[in-house]
Image (cartoon, rainbow, N blue to C red):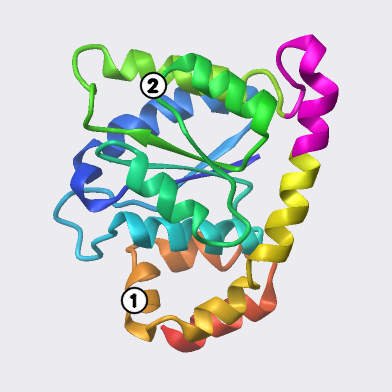
Amino acid sequence: MRIALINENSQAAKNSLIEATLKKVVEPMGHTVVNYGMYTAEDETQLTYVKCGLLASILLNSGAADYVVTGCGTGEGAMLACNSFPGVLCGHLVDPSDGYMFAQINDGNCVALPFAKDFGWGAELKLEMIFQQLFGFGHGNGYPKERVEPEQRNKKILDGVKALTYRPLIDILKDLDADFVRSTISGKHFAELFYPNCKDKEIASFLQQLA
């Protein structure tokens, strides 16, 4: 699985810590981590949590990433922004049990974490445990055992509802302010990370023309 890491501007200084912790946990599982930044608080490209939502949708809808890890100060804004775009089912994770239950019950493709609130002594240990529970036991297996069937049924219903209530991303990209989209994809390493792995030619072509 190709896991993309996205940091918004208020918590960009923690990018290297988050990346290192994520890699430590998921690379032995056979997953790949791709860091889309922000890499430092001083990056020229400043990603707000709304831009993180758009970038997550671009990566997931295009197939350039299979999963997105993002967040903000509380994780709430990033979660709301991600869920406002198509093709993203984002959970808000505060502790390791959230990671396990989101993976098993909700089977989403994106998580938003609080990187300021309660992010103190031992924060990297807490992150490590969250990532272990999120990625270490598969997805969509249900929890507890007696609830597996209705949970899997409800997930399929939710996927069907989202398919009807969201427009295609390419249509949204065309209607969004061009400068907003352009600034979202102007990260230092976006082009080299995204285009070789993008599986949607229409999205890739539109973004290349826009840039």
Q: Mark 1: which amino acid?
A: Phe
The vertical placement of 176 against 95, above or below, is below
SS class, disc 1 = helix
Looking at this rendering, what residue extends furthest in the left direction?
Answer: 42
Q: Quadrant of the C terminus?
A: bottom left
Q: Mark 2: which amino acid?
A: Leu
The vertical placement of 207 against 120, above or below, is below
Q: Which residue is mark 1?
A: 180
- Residue at 60% x, 56% y is 60
Our reading of the magenta stretch's main secondary structure is helix
The vertical placement of 37 against 72, above or below, is below
SS class, disc 2 = helix
Front position in the image: 96 or 83? 83
Front position in the image: 177 or 126? 177
Badge 1 vs badge 2, beta-carbon distance below 8 Å: no
Image coordinates of residue 94 in percent, x first then y, are 39, 24
- Residue at 28% x, 33% y is 115
Query: Is residue 152 shown in magenta?
Result: yes
| Range shown magenta | 140-154
Specify few, some or many for label 1: CA neighbours under 10 Å numbering under 14, 14-19, or 20 or more: few
- Residue at 37% x, 48% y is 78
The quadrant holding residue 21 is top left
Q: Which residue is mark 2?
A: 127
The quadrant holding residue 54 is bottom left
